Image (spheres, grey):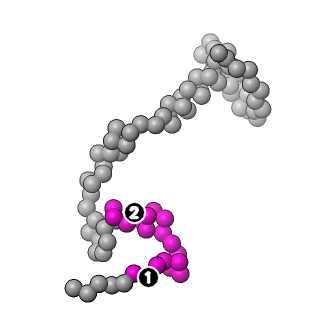
Amino acid sequence: MLRRIQAILEEEQYRWLRDEAERRGLSVSALIREAVEVLRGRQAWRPLDESPFWELVGAGKSHQKGPAISENVDDWVYPLPPHRRPRRSRSRS
């Protein structure tokens, strides 16, 4: 089932869309549907272990002293400013 929509485009966007549709021998609507499918494909969910980036997991070694980055990922990805960091007790060995 096709749905009719109304969209507002900048003049330059509309001209490009119209010209590209003509160049491909499509209607503007068909080109918009094609563009939506391309965007949907880029955002398609897939299991993490099927991602090409999965091969990178564990590939490197950290030469950093202290806690492992992988065990404290939130501290590295979402660092807190110094005044908001919790105080950690230092263990003596």
Q: Which residue is mark 1?
A: 87
Q: Earlier in the sequence, mark 2 or mark 1?
A: 2
State whether residue 64 is above or below residue 93: above
Identify the residue at image location x=39%, y=81%: 88
Q: In the picture, residue 13 is in which quadrant? A: top right
Q: Residue furthest bottom?
A: 92
User: Which residue is rendered at x = 74% and y = 20% of the image?
Assistant: 4
Q: Is residue 16 something that shows in the picture?
A: yes
Quarter location, residue 8 = top right
| Amino acid type assigned to the residue bearing label 1 in the image | Arg
Q: Which mark is residue 73?
A: 2
Between 14 and 88, the one lying in front of the other is 88
Q: Quadrant of the N terminus?
A: top right
Task: Please count the marks in the image.
Answer: 2
Q: Magenta stretch?
A: 70-88
Instruction: Calculate the distance from the C-alpha at mark 2 to the C-alpha at mark 1.
Output: 17 Å
Above or below, comparing residue 75 to residue 17 in the picture: below
Q: Decide if residue 92 is on the left or right side of residue 1.
A: left
* Residue 85 colored in magenta in the image: yes
Residue 74 position, x and y percent, is 43, 64
